[in-house]
């Protein structure tokens, strides 16, 4: 199997918000932030690790630490990952709905 490096970008809402970064900067657990950054670095290198589809073209990266962090993303082609939003196990259902909403908006705005 060939590992394909991936570029990571962040979704920006029509009103200029960046949901992933807003969530990340509010996180107080510095160890969690370090673990999440390491995971995103591995994604950048092409190793998605533990992830699954949650529907409508959105996938969920699972991070086994703390309260069960989740990062939601869409893939554009084979080399681009668009981070949509994130949360933990407690907010998973609403985070998935938001991620699907963001992905739908992105695709309709960019003809993806």
Image (cartoon, grey):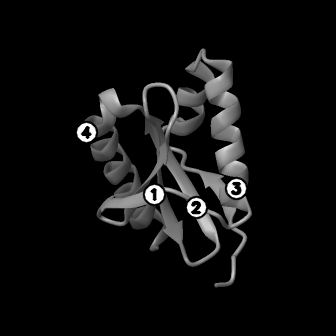
Circle number at residue 42? 3
Mark pair 4, 1: CA separation: 16 Å
Q: Is residue 7 visible?
A: yes
* Vertical arrangement, residue 42 with respect to residue 38, above or below: below
Asked whether the residues under the numbered discs 2 and 3 touch, taking CB atoms below 8 Å apart as contact, a structural biologist would say: yes
Mark pair 1, 2: CA separation: 7 Å
Asked whether the residues under the numbered discs 4 and 1 touch, taking CB atoms below 8 Å apart as contact, a structural biologist would say: no
Q: Earlier in the sequence, mark 4 or mark 3?
A: 3
Q: Which residue is mark 4?
A: 93
Quick check: 5 left or right of 13? right
Mark pair 4, 2: CA separation: 22 Å
Q: Earlier in the sequence, mark 3 or mark 1?
A: 3
Asked whether the residues under the numbered discs 1 and 2 touch, taking CB atoms below 8 Å apart as contact, a structural biologist would say: yes
Q: Quadrant of residue 79?
A: bottom right
Instruction: List x then y, in percent, for residue 107.
Output: 42, 65
Q: Is residue 14 visible?
A: no
Mark pair 2, 3: CA separation: 7 Å
Q: Quadrant of residue 89?
A: top left
Q: Earlier in the sequence, mark 4 or mark 1?
A: 1
Q: Earlier in the sequence, mark 4 or mark 2?
A: 2
Pick whichever, 5 or 98, lies toward us.
5
> Could you tell me which residue is drawn at 47 percent across and 38 percent down?
86
Circle number at residue 51? 1
Q: Earlier in the sequence, mark 2 or mark 3?
A: 3
């Amino acid at each position: 199997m060939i590992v394909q490096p991936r570029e990571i970008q962040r979704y920006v809402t029509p009103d200029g918000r960046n949901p992933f970064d807003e969530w990340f900067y509010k996180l107080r657990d510095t160890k969690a932030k370090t673990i999440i950054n390491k995971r995103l670095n591995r994604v950048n290198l092409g190793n998605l690790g533990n992830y699954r589809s949650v529907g409508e073209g959105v996938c969920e990266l699972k991070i086994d630490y703390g309260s069960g962090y989740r990062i939601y993303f869409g893939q554009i082609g084979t080399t681009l990952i668009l981070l949509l939003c994130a949360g933990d196990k407690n907010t998973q259902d609403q985070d998935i709905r938001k991620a699907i909403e963001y992905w739908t908006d992105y695709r309709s705005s960019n003809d993806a």
